[in-house]
Image (cartoon, rainbow, N blue to C red):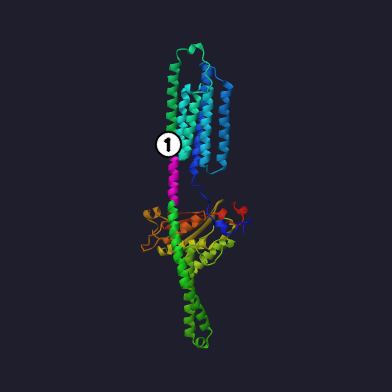
Amino acid sequence: MKGNTPLRARWLPSQWSADAAGRKNMALLVQLRWIAIAGQVATILIVHYGMDIRLPFPSMLVVPCIAAAMNLGSMMILRRRTDISHAELFLALLFDVLALTTQLYLSGGATNPFISLYLVQVALGAVLLHRWSVWGIVAISSLCAAMLSLVYRPLDLSEAFEGRLFDLHIIGTWICLTMIAVLLVLFMTRITRNLQQREAYLARLRQQAAEEEHIVRMGLLASGAAHELGTPLAQLAVVLGDWRHMPEITGHPALVEEVGEMETAIKRCKAILSGILMSAGEARGEAPQITNVRDFVDAIARDWRSANPGMPLRCDFGPHDYPRIVADPVIRQAVTNLLDNAREAGATYIDMLVSRDNRWLHIAVRDNGPGFSEEMLADVGKPYRSSKGKQGGGLGLFLVVNVVRKLGGRVNASNSVEGGAMILLRLPLATLALEEGKHDV
Protein backbone atom coordinates (compact mmCIF):
# COMPACT_ATOMS: atom_id res chain seq x y z
CA MET A 1 0.00 0.00 0.00
CA LYS A 2 1.02 3.56 -0.67
CA GLY A 3 -1.07 5.78 1.50
CA ASN A 4 -4.57 4.40 1.02
CA THR A 5 -3.98 3.34 -2.59
CA PRO A 6 -3.81 -0.41 -3.33
CA LEU A 7 -0.64 -1.62 -5.01
CA ARG A 8 -2.53 -2.76 -8.10
CA ALA A 9 -4.14 0.67 -8.53
CA ARG A 10 -0.72 2.20 -8.99
CA TRP A 11 -0.32 0.32 -12.26
CA LEU A 12 -3.17 2.14 -13.96
CA PRO A 13 -1.86 4.19 -16.92
CA SER A 14 -1.98 7.95 -16.96
CA GLN A 15 -5.22 9.41 -18.25
CA TRP A 16 -4.63 11.31 -21.46
CA SER A 17 -7.32 13.84 -22.34
CA ALA A 18 -8.87 13.43 -25.78
CA ASP A 19 -9.86 17.10 -25.64
CA ALA A 20 -6.33 18.54 -25.39
CA ALA A 21 -7.15 20.52 -28.54
CA GLY A 22 -9.64 22.49 -26.43
CA ARG A 23 -6.80 23.90 -24.37
CA LYS A 24 -4.90 24.97 -27.48
CA ASN A 25 -8.02 26.56 -28.95
CA MET A 26 -8.68 28.46 -25.73
CA ALA A 27 -5.09 29.73 -25.88
CA LEU A 28 -5.78 30.97 -29.41
CA LEU A 29 -8.93 32.74 -28.21
CA VAL A 30 -6.85 34.41 -25.50
CA GLN A 31 -4.39 35.62 -28.16
CA LEU A 32 -7.25 36.87 -30.31
CA ARG A 33 -8.69 38.74 -27.34
CA TRP A 34 -5.33 40.45 -26.71
CA ILE A 35 -5.34 41.61 -30.33
CA ALA A 36 -8.93 42.82 -29.92
CA ILE A 37 -7.99 44.72 -26.74
CA ALA A 38 -5.06 46.41 -28.44
CA GLY A 39 -7.20 47.23 -31.50
CA GLN A 40 -10.03 48.66 -29.40
CA VAL A 41 -7.73 50.88 -27.35
CA ALA A 42 -5.91 52.11 -30.46
CA THR A 43 -9.18 52.79 -32.29
CA ILE A 44 -10.67 54.66 -29.33
CA LEU A 45 -7.58 56.85 -28.98
CA ILE A 46 -7.38 57.60 -32.73
CA VAL A 47 -11.08 58.41 -33.08
CA HIS A 48 -11.32 60.41 -29.86
CA TYR A 49 -8.12 62.43 -30.15
CA GLY A 50 -7.02 62.11 -33.79
CA MET A 51 -10.41 62.53 -35.48
CA ASP A 52 -11.95 64.70 -32.76
CA ILE A 53 -15.05 62.50 -32.55
CA ARG A 54 -16.21 62.66 -28.95
CA LEU A 55 -16.66 59.20 -27.47
CA PRO A 56 -17.67 58.15 -23.94
CA PHE A 57 -13.96 57.65 -23.30
CA PRO A 58 -14.02 56.27 -19.70
CA SER A 59 -16.92 53.90 -20.37
CA MET A 60 -15.35 52.49 -23.54
CA LEU A 61 -12.02 51.84 -21.79
CA VAL A 62 -13.77 49.77 -19.10
CA VAL A 63 -14.53 47.02 -21.63
CA PRO A 64 -10.85 46.41 -22.61
CA CYS A 65 -9.95 46.39 -18.91
CA ILE A 66 -12.57 43.70 -18.20
CA ALA A 67 -11.38 41.73 -21.25
CA ALA A 68 -7.78 41.97 -19.99
CA ALA A 69 -8.87 40.64 -16.59
CA MET A 70 -10.72 37.83 -18.37
CA ASN A 71 -7.56 36.98 -20.28
CA LEU A 72 -5.41 36.93 -17.16
CA GLY A 73 -7.88 34.60 -15.48
CA SER A 74 -7.96 32.35 -18.54
CA MET A 75 -4.16 32.18 -18.62
CA MET A 76 -4.07 31.12 -14.97
CA ILE A 77 -6.61 28.38 -15.71
CA LEU A 78 -4.62 27.20 -18.73
CA ARG A 79 -1.47 26.84 -16.61
CA ARG A 80 -3.21 24.62 -14.07
CA ARG A 81 -5.23 22.42 -16.43
CA THR A 82 -4.53 20.15 -19.37
CA ASP A 83 -7.92 20.40 -21.06
CA ILE A 84 -10.75 22.87 -21.63
CA SER A 85 -14.37 21.80 -21.89
CA HIS A 86 -16.76 22.63 -24.71
CA ALA A 87 -18.91 24.73 -22.33
CA GLU A 88 -15.89 26.89 -21.42
CA LEU A 89 -15.14 27.57 -25.07
CA PHE A 90 -18.78 28.55 -25.58
CA LEU A 91 -18.70 30.94 -22.62
CA ALA A 92 -15.45 32.50 -23.85
CA LEU A 93 -16.98 33.23 -27.27
CA LEU A 94 -20.16 34.50 -25.63
CA PHE A 95 -18.10 36.92 -23.54
CA ASP A 96 -16.44 38.26 -26.71
CA VAL A 97 -19.85 38.75 -28.34
CA LEU A 98 -21.14 40.70 -25.34
CA ALA A 99 -17.95 42.78 -25.12
CA LEU A 100 -18.24 43.72 -28.80
CA THR A 101 -21.92 44.55 -28.30
CA THR A 102 -21.08 46.90 -25.43
CA GLN A 103 -18.47 48.75 -27.47
CA LEU A 104 -20.79 49.08 -30.45
CA TYR A 105 -23.61 50.35 -28.21
CA LEU A 106 -21.33 53.13 -26.96
CA SER A 107 -20.12 54.07 -30.45
CA GLY A 108 -23.09 54.36 -32.78
CA GLY A 109 -24.70 50.92 -32.66
CA ALA A 110 -25.59 49.42 -36.05
CA THR A 111 -24.28 52.52 -37.82
CA ASN A 112 -20.76 51.59 -36.73
CA PRO A 113 -19.03 49.78 -39.64
CA PHE A 114 -17.27 47.46 -37.16
CA ILE A 115 -20.56 45.67 -36.52
CA SER A 116 -19.34 43.08 -39.08
CA LEU A 117 -16.89 41.80 -36.44
CA TYR A 118 -19.73 39.57 -35.23
CA LEU A 119 -18.83 37.36 -38.18
CA VAL A 120 -15.47 36.52 -36.55
CA GLN A 121 -17.18 35.11 -33.45
CA VAL A 122 -19.67 33.16 -35.58
CA ALA A 123 -16.88 31.71 -37.74
CA LEU A 124 -14.85 30.69 -34.68
CA GLY A 125 -17.94 29.09 -33.17
CA ALA A 126 -18.59 27.12 -36.36
CA VAL A 127 -15.13 25.55 -36.06
CA LEU A 128 -14.86 25.09 -32.29
CA LEU A 129 -18.36 24.38 -30.99
CA HIS A 130 -21.03 21.74 -31.30
CA ARG A 131 -24.05 22.34 -33.49
CA TRP A 132 -26.39 23.63 -30.77
CA SER A 133 -23.69 25.95 -29.42
CA VAL A 134 -22.92 27.38 -32.85
CA TRP A 135 -26.57 28.22 -33.40
CA GLY A 136 -26.60 29.74 -29.93
CA ILE A 137 -23.76 32.11 -30.92
CA VAL A 138 -25.57 32.90 -34.20
CA ALA A 139 -28.83 33.66 -32.38
CA ILE A 140 -27.19 35.82 -29.73
CA SER A 141 -25.09 37.73 -32.28
CA SER A 142 -28.15 38.35 -34.47
CA LEU A 143 -30.18 39.47 -31.48
CA CYS A 144 -27.45 41.87 -30.37
CA ALA A 145 -27.08 43.29 -33.89
CA ALA A 146 -30.86 43.81 -34.12
CA MET A 147 -30.90 45.50 -30.71
CA LEU A 148 -28.09 47.83 -31.76
CA SER A 149 -30.20 49.09 -34.66
CA LEU A 150 -32.81 50.27 -32.14
CA VAL A 151 -30.90 51.05 -28.94
CA TYR A 152 -27.49 52.71 -29.02
CA ARG A 153 -25.63 55.87 -28.08
CA PRO A 154 -25.28 58.15 -31.14
CA LEU A 155 -21.85 59.51 -32.02
CA ASP A 156 -21.21 63.12 -31.10
CA LEU A 157 -19.89 64.41 -34.45
CA SER A 158 -18.59 67.89 -35.01
CA GLU A 159 -19.68 70.09 -37.93
CA ALA A 160 -16.43 69.25 -39.73
CA PHE A 161 -17.76 65.78 -40.56
CA GLU A 162 -21.03 66.90 -42.13
CA GLY A 163 -21.20 65.59 -45.68
CA ARG A 164 -18.34 63.15 -45.08
CA LEU A 165 -20.15 60.52 -43.05
CA PHE A 166 -20.66 58.18 -46.00
CA ASP A 167 -16.96 58.34 -46.93
CA LEU A 168 -15.98 57.62 -43.32
CA HIS A 169 -18.39 54.68 -43.23
CA ILE A 170 -16.91 53.22 -46.43
CA ILE A 171 -13.36 53.53 -45.04
CA GLY A 172 -14.42 51.95 -41.75
CA THR A 173 -16.14 49.09 -43.60
CA TRP A 174 -13.00 48.44 -45.64
CA ILE A 175 -10.83 48.40 -42.50
CA CYS A 176 -13.29 46.06 -40.78
CA LEU A 177 -13.39 43.60 -43.69
CA THR A 178 -9.60 43.60 -43.92
CA MET A 179 -9.34 42.85 -40.19
CA ILE A 180 -11.87 40.02 -40.48
CA ALA A 181 -10.02 38.44 -43.41
CA VAL A 182 -6.62 38.63 -41.69
CA LEU A 183 -7.90 37.29 -38.36
CA LEU A 184 -9.78 34.41 -39.98
CA VAL A 185 -6.76 33.33 -42.01
CA LEU A 186 -4.40 33.55 -39.03
CA PHE A 187 -6.55 31.80 -36.49
CA MET A 188 -8.59 29.42 -38.61
CA THR A 189 -5.45 27.77 -39.96
CA ARG A 190 -4.09 27.31 -36.43
CA ILE A 191 -7.40 26.02 -35.08
CA THR A 192 -7.69 23.60 -38.00
CA ARG A 193 -4.19 22.33 -37.23
CA ASN A 194 -5.18 21.78 -33.58
CA LEU A 195 -8.25 19.82 -34.65
CA GLN A 196 -6.17 17.73 -37.05
CA GLN A 197 -3.78 16.88 -34.22
CA ARG A 198 -6.75 15.87 -32.10
CA GLU A 199 -8.04 13.60 -34.89
CA ALA A 200 -4.59 12.01 -35.18
CA TYR A 201 -4.60 11.44 -31.41
CA LEU A 202 -8.02 9.78 -31.60
CA ALA A 203 -6.79 7.60 -34.46
CA ARG A 204 -3.91 6.42 -32.27
CA LEU A 205 -6.40 5.65 -29.49
CA ARG A 206 -8.49 3.57 -31.90
CA GLN A 207 -5.38 1.67 -32.98
CA GLN A 208 -4.43 1.09 -29.36
CA ALA A 209 -7.95 -0.17 -28.59
CA ALA A 210 -7.70 -2.63 -31.48
CA GLU A 211 -4.37 -3.91 -30.19
CA GLU A 212 -5.76 -4.28 -26.67
CA GLU A 213 -8.71 -6.24 -28.05
CA HIS A 214 -6.19 -8.56 -29.66
CA ILE A 215 -4.53 -9.05 -26.26
CA VAL A 216 -7.92 -9.77 -24.67
CA ARG A 217 -8.53 -12.54 -27.19
CA MET A 218 -5.09 -13.99 -26.45
CA GLY A 219 -5.86 -13.78 -22.73
CA LEU A 220 -9.04 -15.79 -23.21
CA LEU A 221 -7.13 -18.46 -25.11
CA ALA A 222 -4.44 -18.55 -22.39
CA SER A 223 -7.09 -18.86 -19.67
CA GLY A 224 -8.62 -21.78 -21.52
CA ALA A 225 -5.20 -23.42 -21.79
CA ALA A 226 -4.69 -22.93 -18.05
CA HIS A 227 -7.94 -24.74 -17.24
CA GLU A 228 -7.20 -27.51 -19.71
CA LEU A 229 -3.52 -28.12 -18.82
CA GLY A 230 -3.24 -27.01 -15.20
CA THR A 231 -5.20 -29.88 -13.67
CA PRO A 232 -3.50 -32.75 -15.60
CA LEU A 233 -0.06 -31.32 -14.81
CA ALA A 234 -0.92 -31.10 -11.12
CA GLN A 235 -2.17 -34.70 -11.14
CA LEU A 236 1.03 -35.88 -12.85
CA ALA A 237 3.13 -34.02 -10.26
CA VAL A 238 1.26 -35.77 -7.42
CA VAL A 239 1.66 -39.20 -9.04
CA LEU A 240 5.38 -38.69 -9.61
CA GLY A 241 5.78 -37.55 -6.02
CA ASP A 242 4.16 -40.78 -4.86
CA TRP A 243 6.34 -42.84 -7.18
CA ARG A 244 9.50 -41.27 -5.78
CA HIS A 245 8.69 -42.81 -2.36
CA MET A 246 7.64 -46.25 -3.58
CA PRO A 247 10.09 -49.11 -2.74
CA GLU A 248 9.79 -50.46 -6.27
CA ILE A 249 11.18 -47.16 -7.59
CA THR A 250 13.70 -46.25 -4.88
CA GLY A 251 15.42 -49.60 -5.35
CA HIS A 252 16.21 -48.89 -9.00
CA PRO A 253 18.54 -45.89 -9.61
CA ALA A 254 17.61 -45.76 -13.29
CA LEU A 255 13.91 -45.40 -12.43
CA VAL A 256 14.68 -42.72 -9.83
CA GLU A 257 16.59 -40.78 -12.48
CA GLU A 258 13.72 -41.09 -14.95
CA VAL A 259 11.20 -39.94 -12.34
CA GLY A 260 13.41 -36.93 -11.65
CA GLU A 261 13.56 -36.11 -15.35
CA MET A 262 9.76 -36.33 -15.61
CA GLU A 263 9.35 -34.02 -12.59
CA THR A 264 11.75 -31.54 -14.23
CA ALA A 265 9.74 -31.71 -17.46
CA ILE A 266 6.49 -31.05 -15.57
CA LYS A 267 8.04 -28.05 -13.78
CA ARG A 268 9.19 -26.79 -17.16
CA CYS A 269 5.66 -27.16 -18.54
CA LYS A 270 4.27 -25.23 -15.56
CA ALA A 271 6.84 -22.47 -16.10
CA ILE A 272 5.92 -22.22 -19.79
CA LEU A 273 2.22 -22.08 -18.87
CA SER A 274 2.91 -19.32 -16.33
CA GLY A 275 4.81 -17.34 -18.97
CA ILE A 276 1.91 -17.65 -21.42
CA LEU A 277 -0.58 -16.47 -18.81
CA MET A 278 1.54 -13.50 -17.74
CA SER A 279 2.11 -12.50 -21.36
CA ALA A 280 -1.66 -12.53 -21.87
CA GLY A 281 -2.21 -10.34 -18.83
CA GLU A 282 -2.68 -12.94 -16.08
CA ALA A 283 -0.15 -13.92 -13.44
CA ARG A 284 -1.64 -17.13 -11.96
CA GLY A 285 -2.25 -15.44 -8.61
CA GLU A 286 1.20 -13.84 -8.37
CA ALA A 287 0.96 -10.42 -6.75
CA PRO A 288 3.38 -7.51 -7.23
CA GLN A 289 6.37 -7.72 -4.86
CA ILE A 290 8.27 -4.98 -3.07
CA THR A 291 11.97 -5.21 -3.87
CA ASN A 292 15.05 -3.27 -4.92
CA VAL A 293 15.74 -2.53 -8.59
CA ARG A 294 19.10 -4.33 -8.46
CA ASP A 295 17.65 -7.41 -6.77
CA PHE A 296 14.73 -7.45 -9.21
CA VAL A 297 16.92 -7.27 -12.33
CA ASP A 298 19.48 -9.71 -10.89
CA ALA A 299 16.68 -12.23 -10.24
CA ILE A 300 15.50 -11.92 -13.85
CA ALA A 301 19.04 -12.43 -15.14
CA ARG A 302 19.66 -15.38 -12.81
CA ASP A 303 16.48 -17.18 -13.85
CA TRP A 304 17.16 -16.53 -17.52
CA ARG A 305 20.74 -17.82 -17.27
CA SER A 306 19.43 -20.98 -15.62
CA ALA A 307 17.00 -21.54 -18.49
CA ASN A 308 19.61 -20.65 -21.14
CA PRO A 309 22.97 -22.11 -20.02
CA GLY A 310 25.93 -21.12 -22.12
CA MET A 311 24.47 -17.77 -23.26
CA PRO A 312 26.45 -14.88 -21.75
CA LEU A 313 24.27 -12.23 -20.10
CA ARG A 314 25.90 -9.24 -18.43
CA CYS A 315 24.10 -6.69 -16.19
CA ASP A 316 25.36 -3.12 -15.82
CA PHE A 317 23.60 -0.87 -13.29
CA GLY A 318 25.75 2.25 -13.63
CA PRO A 319 26.60 4.64 -10.76
CA HIS A 320 23.03 5.23 -9.59
CA ASP A 321 21.04 4.84 -6.40
CA TYR A 322 17.80 3.00 -7.05
CA PRO A 323 14.58 3.19 -5.04
CA ARG A 324 12.58 0.26 -3.79
CA ILE A 325 9.90 -0.61 -6.31
CA VAL A 326 6.67 -2.53 -6.62
CA ALA A 327 7.77 -5.25 -9.06
CA ASP A 328 4.82 -6.61 -10.98
CA PRO A 329 5.40 -10.03 -12.63
CA VAL A 330 4.41 -8.57 -16.03
CA ILE A 331 7.59 -6.45 -15.99
CA ARG A 332 9.65 -9.57 -15.34
CA GLN A 333 7.92 -11.31 -18.24
CA ALA A 334 8.43 -8.29 -20.52
CA VAL A 335 12.19 -8.24 -19.87
CA THR A 336 12.38 -12.03 -20.25
CA ASN A 337 10.63 -11.77 -23.63
CA LEU A 338 13.27 -9.28 -24.79
CA LEU A 339 16.08 -11.61 -23.69
CA ASP A 340 14.43 -14.55 -25.47
CA ASN A 341 14.01 -12.47 -28.64
CA ALA A 342 17.70 -11.52 -28.60
CA ARG A 343 18.73 -15.17 -28.23
CA GLU A 344 16.39 -16.34 -30.99
CA ALA A 345 17.68 -13.59 -33.30
CA GLY A 346 21.14 -15.19 -33.24
CA ALA A 347 22.98 -13.15 -30.61
CA THR A 348 26.05 -14.72 -28.99
CA TYR A 349 25.99 -12.40 -25.97
CA ILE A 350 23.48 -10.02 -24.39
CA ASP A 351 23.91 -6.93 -22.22
CA MET A 352 21.21 -5.66 -19.88
CA LEU A 353 21.84 -1.98 -19.06
CA VAL A 354 19.99 -0.34 -16.18
CA SER A 355 20.00 3.39 -15.37
CA ARG A 356 17.66 6.10 -14.14
CA ASP A 357 17.01 9.82 -14.03
CA ASN A 358 14.60 11.95 -12.03
CA ARG A 359 11.53 10.56 -13.80
CA TRP A 360 12.34 7.27 -15.52
CA LEU A 361 13.83 3.86 -14.85
CA HIS A 362 15.65 2.69 -17.99
CA ILE A 363 16.13 -1.02 -18.76
CA ALA A 364 17.90 -1.67 -22.07
CA VAL A 365 18.54 -5.07 -23.67
CA ARG A 366 21.39 -4.95 -26.19
CA ASP A 367 22.73 -7.83 -28.28
CA ASN A 368 25.24 -8.48 -31.05
CA GLY A 369 22.76 -10.09 -33.43
CA PRO A 370 21.86 -8.92 -36.95
CA GLY A 371 19.81 -5.96 -35.66
CA PHE A 372 16.56 -4.58 -37.02
CA SER A 373 15.78 -3.79 -40.62
CA GLU A 374 14.35 -0.39 -41.51
CA GLU A 375 10.93 -2.00 -42.01
CA MET A 376 11.08 -3.61 -38.58
CA LEU A 377 12.06 -0.33 -36.88
CA ALA A 378 9.06 1.33 -38.50
CA ASP A 379 6.70 -1.45 -37.30
CA VAL A 380 8.09 -2.09 -33.81
CA GLY A 381 5.30 -3.08 -31.44
CA LYS A 382 2.85 -4.21 -34.11
CA PRO A 383 1.65 -7.81 -33.94
CA TYR A 384 3.10 -10.44 -36.27
CA ARG A 385 6.03 -8.22 -37.30
CA SER A 386 9.10 -10.40 -36.82
CA SER A 387 12.62 -10.52 -38.19
CA LYS A 388 12.93 -14.25 -37.42
CA GLY A 389 10.69 -15.34 -40.30
CA LYS A 390 8.52 -17.63 -38.16
CA GLN A 391 4.78 -17.85 -38.67
CA GLY A 392 2.99 -16.14 -35.79
CA GLY A 393 6.21 -14.42 -34.68
CA GLY A 394 6.44 -10.87 -33.41
CA LEU A 395 3.99 -11.31 -30.53
CA GLY A 396 6.71 -11.10 -27.86
CA LEU A 397 7.69 -7.52 -28.67
CA PHE A 398 4.04 -6.64 -29.30
CA LEU A 399 3.15 -7.77 -25.76
CA VAL A 400 6.17 -5.93 -24.30
CA VAL A 401 5.11 -2.65 -25.93
CA ASN A 402 1.54 -2.96 -24.68
CA VAL A 403 2.54 -3.96 -21.14
CA VAL A 404 4.94 -1.03 -20.83
CA ARG A 405 2.41 1.36 -22.36
CA LYS A 406 -0.22 0.31 -19.80
CA LEU A 407 2.26 1.18 -17.04
CA GLY A 408 2.67 4.67 -18.50
CA GLY A 409 6.09 3.91 -20.01
CA ARG A 410 7.65 3.86 -23.47
CA VAL A 411 9.56 1.40 -25.65
CA ASN A 412 12.26 2.49 -28.10
CA ALA A 413 13.97 0.19 -30.60
CA SER A 414 17.21 0.98 -32.40
CA ASN A 415 20.36 -0.57 -33.82
CA SER A 416 23.56 -0.16 -31.83
CA VAL A 417 26.51 1.65 -33.36
CA GLU A 418 28.67 -1.45 -32.76
CA GLY A 419 26.04 -3.64 -34.43
CA GLY A 420 23.09 -5.58 -33.09
CA ALA A 421 19.75 -4.44 -31.75
CA MET A 422 18.81 -2.54 -28.61
CA ILE A 423 15.38 -2.28 -26.96
CA LEU A 424 14.98 0.40 -24.30
CA LEU A 425 12.17 0.23 -21.74
CA ARG A 426 11.40 3.55 -20.03
CA LEU A 427 9.28 2.96 -16.92
CA PRO A 428 8.00 5.92 -14.85
CA LEU A 429 9.40 6.04 -11.32
CA ALA A 430 6.19 7.76 -10.22
CA THR A 431 4.47 4.43 -10.92
CA LEU A 432 7.18 2.01 -9.83
CA ALA A 433 8.87 3.62 -6.84
CA LEU A 434 7.54 2.74 -3.41
CA GLU A 435 8.84 5.91 -1.79
CA GLU A 436 8.30 9.23 -3.63
CA GLY A 437 11.07 10.92 -1.63
CA LYS A 438 13.76 8.77 -3.33
CA HIS A 439 13.19 9.93 -6.87
CA ASP A 440 16.01 12.42 -7.03
CA VAL A 441 19.36 11.30 -8.32
Which residue is outermost to the right? 3
Left or right of 86: which side holds 347? left
Q: In the rendered structure, which segment of residues is drawn in magenta?
A: 193-205
Number of marks present in the image shown: 1
Is residue 349 at least partly visible in the picture? no
Measured as percent of width and height from the top left, residue 83 is found at 52, 43
In this rendered view, identify the residue nearer to me: 363 or 213: 213
- In the current view of this chain or complex, which residue is farthest to the top? 159
Tell me which residue sits at (44%, 29%) in the image. 180
The image shows residue 18, relative to residue 36, as above or below, that is below
Identified at 49% across, 58% down, the residue is: 403
Please, what is the three-letter code of the amino acid marked with disc 1?
Answer: Thr
Residue 433 against residue 248 in the figure, above or below: above
What residue is disc 1 on? 189
Overall secondary structure of the magenta section:
helix
Magenta-colored stretch includes residue 198 = yes
Q: Residue 417 appears in which quarter of the rendering?
A: bottom left
Image spot of residue 31 (x, y percent): 51, 33
Quadrant of the drawing holding the N terminus: bottom right
Q: Compared with residue 423, is residue 32 higher up or lower down, i.e. above or below?
A: above
Q: Position of residue 165 (x, y in %)?
A: 46, 16
Q: Regarding mark 1 in the picture, which secondary structure is present there? A: helix
**Residue 433 can be seen, yes or no:** yes
The magenta stretch spans residue 429? no
Q: On the image, which quarter does residue 298 sit in? A: bottom right
Give the answer, above or below, for where 106 lies relative to 195: above
In terms of depth relative to the viewer, which is nearer, 437 or 319?
Answer: 437
Mark 1 Cα shell of 10 Å, populated few (<14), some (14-19), many (≥20): few
- Residue 288: where, in percent of width, then height? 56, 62
